[in-house]
Image (cartoon, helix red, strand yellow):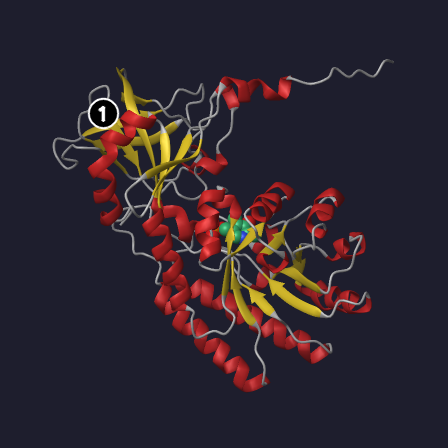
Amino acid sequence: MPMSDSYKKRLANILPQIVDTFGTPFHIYDEKGIKETCHRLISAFKDIKGFREYFAVKALPNPSIMKIMKAVGFGFDCSSAPEIELSRQIGSLQNDIMFTSNNTSISQFETALSNGGCILNLDDISLISKLTKIPDLICFRYNPGSRRKGNKIIGNPVESKYGVSHDQIIDAYTQSIELGVTRFGIHTMLASNELNYEYMVETTRMLLDIVEMICEKLPVTFEFINIGGGLGIPYIPDATPFNLDAMALETTELFRKFENQNGWVPKLYMESGRYITGPHGVLVTSVINHKNIYRKYVGVDASMSALMRPGMYDAYHHIHIHGKDNSSVLKKVDVVGALCENIDKFAVQRDLPPTVEGDILVIHDTGAHGHAMGFNYNGHLRPKELLLKEDSSVELIRRAETMDDYFSTLKFERAILRG
Ligand SMILES: *Cc1c(COP(=O)(O)O)cnc(C)c1O
């Protein structure tokens, strides 16, 4: 079920007031729901010593949301210097930040290694020699190639640009040892929006097997394995939700077996984004136009600058209309934004009840990879972000972009190279 009934109810009670106060469009996130999911994750993996989630910042890079996660003990998975900066600004220290970049530039490494550094997750064997400082701890991202089938979104590992290949992995750790690295981790990320929990269990099994294989050949142990993110959420009503408890149970069993066999055990790290915040955000937008040509169109005041997923991935986002019986006399419509791109549609041939101008549409499951993915193509500006707090107050946690923001990169000192 997309968007919990609890969030739907609490939001519906005050939605007209929120719209009056802040104006549409906006994303609004549910503090209660996010906290509950954080605690659910922690409790599911409580029997694995040192379990830690590093929230994938790219899913929802807003400091007010990240502070909620920091308070429950999560770290942050970053893949760029600005994401590292954002995590540091809310007080994250070295071990709270995992830097999972790829095709990394020297300047990104400089940011990562500054201020006491962070956990470096290297995407390639060639990057070891590019580090200006050798950290105590190094992690490599592992790409199993044909040993694993990829999932639908991320694709086949053989074709994926990420990670160190199976044949290079021993060499990667050997070179690190030679440079004086003493602590090690291993990471992989093979799935995205995966609803089958067994895929994630297989990933843990694969990493634990690799760790055993490396430890047989080299005089090392591993501080952690990081199984990446990719836990799915059911965007489509009636889709079966991800079975977190089953995943946790079978994963815990794999860790117990590993410890029995080896007399030691790495910690388990995870870097979910979507699973933590996805269902706890919605995009609220007003109907501004109707158009009937070959199809019926409902025009809203948000466009794909606020939510790319439908246009980019053909993703389904459930929509309900505030205050209407959403099962009565349905008509097939396309719900569209204002971009000069025909993919700027939040829904295509969707059955919705009739609407009038001013009606409020609630687009579900925009809490991850929603606002963050927005862009300014065609001069469309990104909307504001709000947080529905546990005490039912609503806080503005990011203002909408303005025309000044749009013009800000055109204010600069003229520079010219004369030929
Ligand atoms: C995007 C990403 C994640 C988070 O993915 P979700 O599908 O949101 O869980 C985690 N780790 C890395 C390296 C990523 O690129």
Q: Residue at x 43, y 69 (%)?
A: 45
- Residue 52 at what x, y percent from top left? 50, 64
Q: Is residue 354 above or below residue 174?
A: above
Query: Considering only vertical position in the picture, is 164 above or below 51?
Result: above
Q: Tell me residue 12's x, y (percent).
A: 22, 38
* Residue 415 locus on image (x, y percent): 77, 17
- The reply to whether residue 196 is visible in this rendering is no
Instruction: Identify the element where label 1 is drawn.
Output: loop
Of all residues shown, which one is farthest toward the right? Answer: 419
Residue hosting label 1: 359
**Where is residue 145 shown, x and y percent of the image?**
61, 59
Front-most of residues 152 and 284? 284
Q: Residue at coordinates 74% horizontally, 15% vertically from top-left?
A: 414
Q: Nearer the viewer, residue 294 or 367?
A: 367
Disc 1 beta carbon < 8 A from ligand 1?
Answer: no
User: In the figure, 415 relative to 179: above or below?
Assistant: above
What is the quadrant of residue 19 in the picture? top left
The residue at 45%/29% (across/down) is 399
Decide if residue 12 is on the left or right side of residue 308: left
Q: 10 Å neighbourhood of mark 1: few (<14), some, or many (≥20)?
A: some
Quadrant in the picture for residue 231:
bottom left
Is residue 50 in sight in this rendering? yes
Q: In the figure, residue 266 lies in which quadrant? A: bottom right
Residue drawn at x 41%, y 52% as measured from the top left: 276
* Image quadrant where one finds the C terminus: top right
Count of numbered circles in the view: 1
Amino acid type at circle 1 is: Asp
Residue 88 shown left or right of residue 349 in the figure: right
407 lies above or below 275: above
